[in-house]
Every structure is written in structure tokens, then in C-alpha cells.
Amino acid sequence: MMRSDSIRKALKFTNIVMILASIVPFIINTLYYNITLNQYEGIIENVYSANSLSSNLKNDIYTTMWNIVTGKTTFKDNTQYALIGRIRENLDELEKNANSEDNGYLVQVARNTLETMESYVNSIGDNIARERPVRENEELLGEIASVSDLLYDVIQKFVAAEMELAHIQNAKIRQSMDLMTLTQVLLFFAILMFLLRNYRQLNRRINEPIWRLKTMASRIAQGDLSIRVEKPEISELDELTDSLNTMAEKLIKLIDQNVQKQRNLQKAEMKALQAQIAPHFMYNTLGTILSLAEDGQTENVVTTTLALSSFFRLSLNKGRDWVTVAEEKAHVENYLAIQKMRYGAILEYDFDFSPEILKESMLKLLLQPLVENAIYHGIKKTRRRGHIAVKGTAEGDSMIFTVQDNGLGMTPEELEKLQANLLNYDVSSPGSGFGLYNVYKRIELYYETGDGLTVESEYDKGCTITLRLPIVRTQAAQPAPDQTQAAPTEGA
């Protein structure tokens, strides 16, 4: 199958085309519009300045010189030259901003006319200084009026020329606006056609492979893990296709693994049942009872028999998995009472449980395997007197149980190996450490936590096993109505 181009590249090309098609014409039109508008504003400014100059030109110059000739003001006040200076500055500004050569020529004519007017003003000044007859100054005043009219006419021609340019610029502005509008309309339709074309192409190139992937996902959800999808026509879906194919393969493996784990769990449950029944424990206990009977220790025979009966009653618990902490504590007390009969003075123990946790629920048979582990793997391997301390207390939303012994303990290497066995124990070939693994695994399954059991040990100093169990308030223990009282606790 021929592979098409990347969708990412197609979208990138589409975006670039749209951006360029939108921005470039807009920038060009905007620049042209701004340039034309600036020229138009310059023309309007020139017209305004020229009108302001011409409106005051005739009256101001003639009136100023008339007042000098008639003696109302003196020539030495220089008001006439100040006025001429302002007019010259205005002409300089108009010449600077002239928008055509013809307008610049008109400003130059106006400047020459102003110089002629200034020469007449100088003549009036000379006549006044030499005290010439007033008649001569009146004649000069008439010439100034004529020159003022000429200057006014020149300025008006400049205004007319600038107004013509303003009209032309205004037409250009309208044209630029019309062109911009037309360009935007054409661009809109061009982009619309381009997008519709790309949409049809992309839709065709994407929908088909996505539909195949969707079909695969639906069939996987229905349980058909044999389906596979070929590589699609677009590269962006390669990884998704590979992931779905890989997921289907891994699901098959995970299902197989889960089936195997279920089998292992069933084996573990069978092994746990065998450990709970503990035939060898019963055999040893009955042997102890027989020895006590032969020695005539009737009271101890009764006590041991009651403890054994209560031990198995609590072990079976009518098939229930949950008991109260008080029941679990009684179960361990019965077990230790029996062991006390066997080992005598070399075994001592004590209990320390907080009263507030005794009515809480917990998974059954969690503490007894730990105590059994402390006796057989700790205390029995030493020659000194053994001591086991079983404690239970509340800590926040959890219950903390510890089983501490002063037995042989473990080296760091042995402790590390034990911890590794807890995580990777082969229940199909159980050996040492099965009791701890059974507790660890049941906590993991029922409490859904992986850190419910921790082991601390130091060689020749003993071992401490800690259980951290969440308080399960929704799992009532439902204690049996005929609970047997536990054997008395014996301490050091």
C-alpha cells in the first residue's frame, strides 16, 4: 500500500498558506492606506496653514502700516517686522510641506512678493526717519496694499492646488479601501475553497484508518484478542496502531498470567488450610496431654485440652474470614498456652493490647503464624530462656500489631533473603517461610496493601514482626455466640 504524506506536514502547509494569504495582503493594503492617509493629512495641514495665513494677511499688514503712517504707532516698535517674520516662517513651512513642484513654485512667488512688501516697509521707515512728506508714505501704503492683495492671491492659488491634491488623495484612499475590501472578500472565498479541499482530503485519509482502529478496539473490548491492524496510510497513526497491536498481545499474556496466578492462589489457600489445621501441632499437643495424664497432672490436662479445643474452634471460625481482635488475641493465647505446656520454663510470653481495638475486625489467623515462627525459628534455636511479646495498638486509621522474640534472629543476608521470598514465593513448592508468606499475601489480597508486614531482626538478639492493618469498619466480625474463654495469659 502506498504511504501518503504526513498529516502533520499537510496541516503545517495549510497553516502557512492561510497565514500568508491573510497577513501579506493585509500588510500591503495597510501600508498603502497609511501612506496615502499620511499624505492626505499633510495636504489638509497645508491647506489649514495657508488659510490661516491668508485670512490675516491683508488686514494685518495694511492696518499695521496704516497705524505707523498716521502716527498711532511708531516705526521703532518693529511690529511690522515681527508680522513679516511670522509670514516668512509660515511660507517656509508651506514650502517645506509642498506636495508638488507647482505648489513649491507658488510659495517661492509668495516669498518674493513678501520681500517686495518688506522693501516698501523699509522705504516708509526711511521716509519717516528723514521726515519726508506724509504723501509719499501714503503712496507707498497703496503699494503695500497692492502687494498684499497679490500675496493673498498667490496663497489662495496654493490652497486651491492643495485642495486638488487632497481630492486626488481622497480618491486614492477610497480606492485603497475598496481594494482592501475586495481583497478580503476574494481571500475569504479562496481560503474557504482551500480549506474545503483540504478537509475532504484529510477526512478521506484519516477516517478510514481511524475506523479500522476503532473496529479493532471494539472487538478487543468484546474479547476478540486475535485481531490485528496493518500499518495505516498516514504516519501519525503508526504508533497508535503498533500500541493497539502490542496491547492485544500483552492482554493475551496477562490473561494467561492471571489464570496462572488464580491457580497459584488456590494452591496457596489449600496450603493455608493445611497450615491452619497443622496436624503435627495436634499430634504434639496430644502427646503432651498424654504425658501430663500419665504424670497425674489432671488440672493441666484439662487446661491443655480446653486450650486445644478453643484453638481449633477459633481456627475454623465457622468458615468466616474475619474475626474481632479479641478473638484473634484469644486464639494466640490458646496456642501459647499449649506451647507453654510443652516447653515449660524455657518459654515465657505476655500480651499488651489496647482495649479500644479489641472490638475491631481483622482477618483471622494473622498473629498465630507469626508467634509460631518466633518459637520454631527463633527461640528453639537458642539455649537461653525464650520470651515472646505480642502487642496491639491503634494508630490513626490503622492497627499496629507486633510479635517480638529474643530468639536467634537473622543475619542481614538472611533477612534480605526472607524479604525477597515474601515478594517472590513459590507456593507450588512450599518450604521455610511459608507461614510469613501466607500472612503477607493474605494481607495484600484482603487489605489491598503491599506494606502490611515488615520484619526487623538482628542476629542473636531476636526478631520483631510488625503488622499494619487498616481499620475495616464495614467488615463486621460477627463473633460466634459460644466463644470459649481463652487460657490465662502467662508472663515472665
Image (tube, rainbow, N blue to C red):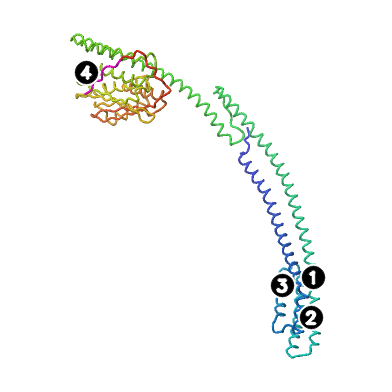
Toward the viewer: 151 or 69?
A: 69
Q: Which residue is mark 1?
A: 156
Q: Amino acid at mark 3?
A: Asn
The quadrant in which residue 110 appears is bottom right
Q: Is residue 456 above or below residue 87?
A: above
Q: Main secondary structure of the magenta part?
A: loop
Residue 297 percent coordinates (x, y): 19, 11
Mark 3 → mark 4, Cα distance in angstroms: 127 Å
Q: Which residue is mark 3?
A: 90
Question: For numbered disc 3, what is the local secondary structure?
Answer: helix
Residue 343 numbered mark, or none: 4
Q: Which residues are magenta?
A: 485-492
User: How many C-alpha atoms fall within 10 Å of the one at disc 4: few (<14), some, or many (≥20)?
Assistant: few
The label nearer to you, 3 versus 2, is: 2
Q: Residue at x 50, y 25 (%)?
A: 251
Disc 4, disc 1: CB below 8 Å? no
Mark 1 → mark 3, Cα distance in angstroms: 14 Å
Residue 153 percent coordinates (x, y): 81, 73
Mark 3 → mark 2, Cα distance in angstroms: 19 Å
Q: Which residue is mark 2?
A: 144
Mark 4 → mark 1, Cα distance in angstroms: 134 Å
Q: Residue at x 78, y 65 (%)?
A: 163
